[in-house]
C-alpha cells in the first residue's frame, strides 16, 4: 500500500475525531470526573436517581420504582421522572466503579460520542467526509446536544440515537429489497432505545420516517414502518408501562393546552446563533433579534449560517437531488412542530381575529376528545392566535400533549438542516466552501460548561433535621419564594436527611403537590394568614424550610416568620 493511499484511508478516520475532541476539550471544563459535575439543578436529579436505584436494589433490596420521601404524604413513583429507569439501571455499574459523579460524566461524554458518530455516518451518506465532519460537529455541539449535558442527559442520548436512527432509515431506503429487512430491524432497535432513554422518542421516532419522502405511502414501506414500530414498542414497553402506571397511581397533574403552548419555540428564536454563544458579538447579535424568554422555548437556535446554508441546500435538493427530498420534508415539518400550538414572536402570541372561528372549532374538538387538556373555556391566547398544526395534533392525537416541551422537535430539524447545509457547501466553489466552513465553526462554538463539586455534605439545616424525630405521617416542606421549591436539589437532599418532603422534582407532579404549589403561588401572603396552619396540617408538615436564593427574598420571609407562631406544631 502506497503512502498516499494509506493517507486517503486513515485521514478520513482520524481528522473527524480530532476535530470532535478539539471542540470537546474547548468546552468541557470538568477536570475530575469523580468529584465534579457540569451543573447542579437537573444534574442532581440524575445523581439522585442513580444513587436511589443502587441503594434500593443492593442495600435495601426493594423496588426503586417508588419512594415515600418525595411528594409527601402520598409518595412518588420514580418512573414518572423524565430520566427513565433504563438510564438509571445502565448507569449502576459506573456508579459502583466511581460514584454518581463519575457515572454522570461518563454517560454524558458517551452520549456526545454516540451523537457525533451517528451524525457523521448519516451526513456521510450525502456529502464528502470533510463536510460531513463539520455537519456532525454542528449537530453534536448544538443546544439539544452539548448544552443538555447540564442536566437533560436523556435528551442528549435521544439526539444521539436519533442520528443513528436516521442513518439506518436512509440505509433501508437505499438498500436492495433483499437486504432491507435487516435495516428495518436495526431501525426498530434504535427507535426502541430512543424510547427507553426518553419518551419523546415515541413521536420523534415516528417523524423520522419522513426521510423516506413519498415512499412512506408505498404499501411495502408502510409494512416496514409497522414492523419497525412493533420492534420499538416491544423494546420500549417496559418504560412506557412503568410511566403509565406511575402517572395513574400518583394522580399526576395533566398539563393543559395553554401550558404546552408556552413551550413552543418563537419563530424569531430558531434561525439565529445561540443566545448563549461564548463570543460576545455573536451572542449580542442573537439577543438583538430574539428578546423572549431564555428557557427551552427560546434556546433551540439553529444558527444564522446553518439556516442560510440549509435554505440553499433545499434549492439544490429540489433542483438536482429529488431522491433526497425527505431531508427537506423532515426539516420543514420539525420546524413547524417545534413552534408548538400557536405562532409566537419574542415569546408573545401573534394574534389576528380572522383565526377566531378556526381556533374555536379546534378547541371544541379538543374539549370533546380530551376534556382534561382542553378546558370548557378558551384561554385568551387561543381566541385570536395564529394556529399551527401542533394545535390540531394536540386535540386529536392520543398522548401528543405528553410531549410538553414541544420545542424539542427542533432536534429533527437540526439533523436534517446540517446535512442540507453540507449539500449546499459542496455545490459552492472551493474557496467559498472553505471560508463558509470557517465561519460555521465559529458559529457552532460551544459555550464552556462549569466545573462544580459534587455535593457530599448536607446543608447545616438538613444536618439539624437529621437529628429531629418525625411522627407517623409527618414530613417537611421546602419553599422558595413565593411557593414550593421544586428541583434536583430537593431529591439530592433526601439522600442525606432521609425525611419525607412535600416538595419534589420533575415536570409532572401529583395533584396534591400541584394544589399546594398553586395555593401559595396565587396568594403570596398565605404564610401571613393564620389559617394556613390548617392547610399545612392536612399535609402532615412538621417543619418549614425557606430556601433563600436572592437577598430580596429575606424581607419576604422575615414578614412570614412573624406569623409562624400562629400555626406552630
Image (cartoon, helix red, strand yellow):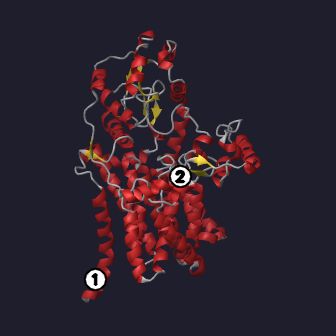
Confirm whether residue 501 shows in the render: yes
Lateral position of residue 457 relative to residue 184, left or right:
left
Residue placed most toward the observer, 152 or 422 = 422
Label 1 sits on a secondary structure element that is helix
Query: In the rendered view, would you say 348 is above or below 286?
Result: above
Q: Quadrant of residue 207?
A: bottom right
Lateral position of residue 400 relative to residue 412, left or right:
right
Give me the residue at 45% from left, 11% from top. 567
Q: Which mark is residue 223?
A: none
Give me the residue at 39% from left, 75% from top. 435
Residue placed most toward the observer, 82 or 286 = 286
Label 2 sits on a secondary structure element that is helix
The residue labelled by disc 1 is 7
In which quadrant of the rendered image does the N terminus lie? Answer: bottom left
Residue 169 position in % (x across, y down): 52, 68
Residue placed most toward the observer, 167 or 410 = 410
Give me the residue at 55% from left, 50% from top. 346
Among numbered discs 1 and 2, the one appearing first in the sequence: 1
Foreground disc of the pair 1, 2: 2
Residue placed most toward the observer, 227 or 283 = 283
Q: Which residue occupies the extreme bottom position in the image? A: 2
Lateral position of residue 260 relative to residue 450, left or right:
right
In which quadrant of the rendered image does the C terminus lie? Answer: top left
Q: Callout 2 environment at 10 Å: few (<14), some (14 to 19), or many (20+)?
A: many
Residue 67 position in % (x across, y down): 42, 31
The residue labelled by disc 2 is 407
Residue 373 position in % (x across, y down): 64, 40
Amino acid at each position: 500500500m502506497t503512502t498516499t493511499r494509506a493517507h486517503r484511508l486513515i485521514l478520513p478516520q482520524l481528522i473527524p475525531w480530532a476535530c470532535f475532541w478539539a471542540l470537546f476539550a474547548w468546552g468541557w471544563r470538568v477536570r475530575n470526573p469523580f468529584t465534579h459535575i457540569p451543573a447542579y439543578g437537573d444534574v442532581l436529579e440524575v445523581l439522585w436517581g442513580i444513587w436511589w436505584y443502587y441503594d434500593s436494589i443492593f442495600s435495601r433490596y426493594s423496588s426503586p420504582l417508588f419512594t415515600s420521601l418525595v411528594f409527601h404524604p402520598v409518595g412518588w413513583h420514580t418512573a414518572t421522572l423524565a430520566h427513565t429507569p433504563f438510564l438509571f439501571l445502565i448507569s449502576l455499574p459506573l456508579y459502583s466503579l466511581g460514584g454518581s459523579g463519575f457515572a454522570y460524566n461518563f454517560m454524558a461524554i458517551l452520549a456526545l460520542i454516540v451523537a457525533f458518530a451517528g451524525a457523521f455516518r448519516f451526513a456521510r451518506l450525502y456529502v464528502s467526509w470533510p463536510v460531513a465532519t463539520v455537519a456532525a460537529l454542528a449537530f453534536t455541539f448544538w443546544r439539544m446536544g452539548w448544552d443538555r449535558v447540564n442536566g437533560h442527559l436523556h435528551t442528549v442520548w435521544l439526539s444521539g440515537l436519533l442520528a443513528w436512527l436516521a442513518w439506518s432509515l436512509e440505509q433501508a431506503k437505499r438498500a436492495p429489497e433483499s437486504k432491507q429487512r435487516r435495516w428495518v430491524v436495526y431501525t426498530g432497535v434504535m427507535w426502541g432505545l430512543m424510547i427507553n432513554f426518553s419518551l419523546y422518542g415515541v413521536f420523534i421516532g415516528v417523524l423520522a420516517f419522513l426521510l423516506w419522502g413519498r415512499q412512506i405511502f408505498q404499501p411495502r414501506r408502510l409494512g416496514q414502518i409497522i414492523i419497525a414500530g412493533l420492534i420499538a414498542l416491544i423494546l420500549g414497553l417496559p418504560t412506557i408501562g412503568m410511566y403509565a402506571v406511575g402517572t395513574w397511581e400518583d394522580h399526576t397533574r395533566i398539563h393543559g393546552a395553554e401550558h404546552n403552548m408556552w413551550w413552543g419555540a418563537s419563530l424569531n428564536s430558531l434561525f439565529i446563533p445561540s443566545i448563549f454563544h461564548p463570543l460576545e458579538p455573536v451572542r449580542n447579535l442573537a439577543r438583538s433579534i430574539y428578546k423572549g424568554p431564555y428557557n427551552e422555548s427560546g434556546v433551540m437556535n439553529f444558527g444564522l449560517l446553518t439556516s442560510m446554508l440549509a435554505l440553499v441546500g433545499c434549492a439544490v435538493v429540489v433542483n438536482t437531488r429529488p431522491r433526497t427530498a425527505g431531508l427537506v420534508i423532515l426539516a420543514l415539518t420539525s420546524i413547524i412542530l417545534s413552534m408548538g400550538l400557536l405562532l409566537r414572536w419574542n415569546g408573545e402570541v401573534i394574534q389576528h381575529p380572522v383565526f377566531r372561528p378556526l381556533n374555536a372549532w379546534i378547541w371544541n374538538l379538543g374539549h370533546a376528545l380530551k376534556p382534561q387538556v382542553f378546558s370548557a373555556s378558551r384561554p385568551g391566547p387561543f381566541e385570536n392566535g395564529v394556529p399551527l398544526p401542533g394545535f390540531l395534533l394536540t386535540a386529536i392525537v392520543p398522548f401528543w400533549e405528553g410531549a410538553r416541551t414541544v420545542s424539542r422537535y427542533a432536534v429533527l430539524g437540526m439533523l436534517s438542516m446540517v446535512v442540507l447545509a453540507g449539500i449546499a457547501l459542496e455545490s459552492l466553489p472551493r474557496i467559498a466552501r472553505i471560508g463558509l466552513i470557517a465561519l460555521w465553526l465559529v458559529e457552532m462554538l460551544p459555550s464552556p460548561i462549569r466545573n462544580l463539586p459534587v455535593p457530599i455534605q448536607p446543608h447545616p439545616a438538613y444536618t439539624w433535621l437529621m437529628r429531629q424525630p418525625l411522627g407517623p405521617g409527618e414530613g417537611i416542606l421546602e419553599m422558595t419564594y413565593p411557593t414550593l421549591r421544586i428541583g434536583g436539589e430537593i431529591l439530592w437532599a433526601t439522600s442525606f436527611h432521609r425525611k419525607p418532603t412535600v416538595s419534589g422534582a420533575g415536570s409532572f407532579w401529583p395533584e396534591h403537590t400541584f394544589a399546594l404549589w398553586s395555593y401559595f403561588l396565587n396568594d403570596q401572603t398565605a404564610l401571613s394568614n393564620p389559617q394556613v396552619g390548617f392547610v399545612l396540617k392536612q399535609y402532615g408538615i412538621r417543619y418549614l424550610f425557606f430556601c433563600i436564593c436572592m437577598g430580596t427574598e429575606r424581607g419576604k420571609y422575615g414578614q412570614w416568620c412573624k406569623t409562624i407562631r400562629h400555626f406552630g406544631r
